[in-house]
Image (cartoon, rainbow, N blue to C red):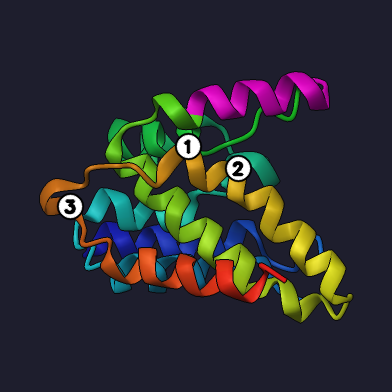
Amino acid sequence: MVDIVQARNFAKKKHVGQLRKNGKTTTFSHLQDVVKNLKKMKVTNEDIICAGWLHDTIEDTDTDFDMIKDLFGKSVADIVVSVTKDNRLPKKQREAKYAKDLRASNAKAKLVKIADILANVNDAPNAGKNAYWEKQQFVKKSKYWSYVSGVKPGKLAELTWAKNEWKRLEEKYSN
C-alpha cells in the first residue's frame, strides 16, 4: 500500500496546477478517475494502481522512465511507458507509434489504458463545448479502445463494468 500512496503523492506533486486540455478539469482529478475506474474493474494489483496514478507523468511532466523505475520499480515504469505518447516525434509518427505500442502492450498496461479512456470520455462533457466536440472525443478514443479492449486480464481484473460502461457511451454518442 505504501507504493500506491507514494505514487498518488508523487503524481499530485508533479501535476500541481495542471489542467487537462479542456482547461477545466485538473490533471489530478483525472488521475483519481482513472484509479476509481481500475477499482471498478476490481484491480488490486499494486503495480497497475501505481501506474494508474503515474500514467501521465512522462507525457506531461519532467518525469522520465528512469525516475519512475527508480522510485516505483521496472514493472510500474514499463506499464507507464506503454501508455505514453512520445512527444518528441511529429504528430503522425507519434500516433502510429502509440497505436503500435498499445497493441503490443501487456495486460497490465491495457487495463490502465481502458480506465484512462473511460475517464477521458466521461470527462468530455465537463469541457463545456458542444455535443459535436464531445462525439469527436469519443470517436478518437474509440480507436484506442479497439487496441486494448480485447485484453484477457485473467485474475488481474473483471471487465464487465468497463464493457458495460463502453456500451453506455457508444449508445450516448451513436446519434
Residue 85 horizontal/vertical position (percent): 64, 33
Q: Residue at x 69, y 46 (%)?
A: 60
Disc number for residue 143: 2
Query: 86 or 93, which is in the foreground?
Result: 93
- Which residue occupies 89% across, 75% down? 129
In terms of secondary structure, where does tag 3 sit?
Answer: helix
Residue placed furthest toward the front: 175
**38 relative to 99 in the view: left or right:** left
Asked whether 106 or 80 is in front, the reply is: 106
Seen in the picture, residue 76 relative to 22 is either above or below; the reply is above
The residue range painted magenta reads 90-101
Neighbour class for label 1 at 10 Å: few (<14), some, many (≥20)?
some
Residue 20 is at least partly visible in this image? no
- Relative to 43, does residue 97 appear above or below in the rendering? above
- Is the C-beta separation of discs 1 and 3 under 8 Å? no
Mark 3 highlights which residue? 156
Q: Quadrant of the N terminus?
A: bottom left
The Cα–Cα distance between marks 2 and 3, rounded to whole angstroms, is 23 Å
Instruction: Count residues near mark 2 (Cα–Cα under 10 Å), then give few for <14, some for 14-19, many for 20+.
Output: few
